[in-house]
Image (cartoon, helix red, strand yellow):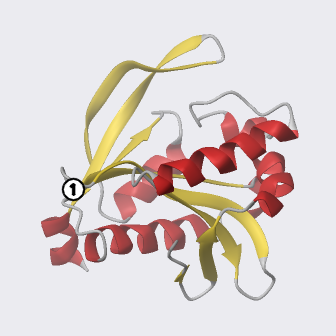
Amino acid sequence: MFPVLKTERLILRELTEYDAKVIFSILSNPQVTRFYGKETFKKIEEANEFINYFKQKFNEKRGFRWCIEIKDSEQLVGTVGLDAWVPKQRRAEIGYELHPEFWNNGYATEAVSKIISFGFDSLELIRIGAIVFPENEPSNKLLQKIGFQKEGILRNYIYQDGVSNDTYVYSIINKDYKQSY
């Protein structure tokens, strides 16, 4: 059963086919996909594929992807997830995106913090990583603010829109998380 998580202002729930229109509105926005590592969506079918992809990842015990929904309005504002989950190695990578209309409200920080807690407390992860474009200042700041450490740079790591991009690699490990929370 897919876990539903709650924060003070948010509900993190499973993606469903009913979310396709909103997912499309988010991932068809070039502001969102500029540093996403994937091409900007052009068709609603891509949103359906996105939802099905993460359902399959969950069923195969290789990842989770939650909708980020504002509690009071049930407004879907983005998604957050643990991908590249390797239970045997006790590690995963976090990823997230929000519609620009909801940037700078603390929603990403709140959702990411909850997922980190879930990863360490429920999945007993030892490490959670993140891959971020160096130019994505808001994401770099968010990760550092909540305890991630920059480990280095992955040269030409993500190929997007015909360009090979460097990325930073970050991590937070369980023992550091336990000491700071």
Q: Amino acid at mark 1?
A: Arg
Q: Is residue 142 above or below residue 46?
A: below
Quadrant of the rendered image containing residue 38: top right
Q: Quadrant of residue 103?
A: bottom right
Q: Residue at x 74, y 31 (%)?
A: 40
Does 138 sit left or right of 28 as displayed?
A: left
- Left or right of 142 in this view: 80: right
Q: Is residue 83 above or below residue 175?
A: above
Q: Is residue 128 visible?
A: no
Give the answer, above or below, for where 167 lies relative to 72. Answer: above
- The residue that appears at 18% across and 50% down in the rendered structure is 89
Q: Is residue 12 left or right of residue 131?
A: right
Q: Looking at the picture, how far across and down is residue 74, in whole percent?
A: 78, 80
Where is residue 148 drawn, in percent x and y? 30, 56
Q: Nearer the viewer, residue 95 or 4?
A: 4
Q: Which residue is mark 1?
A: 90
Q: Quadrant of the C terminus?
A: bottom left
| Relative to 5, residue 64 above or below | above
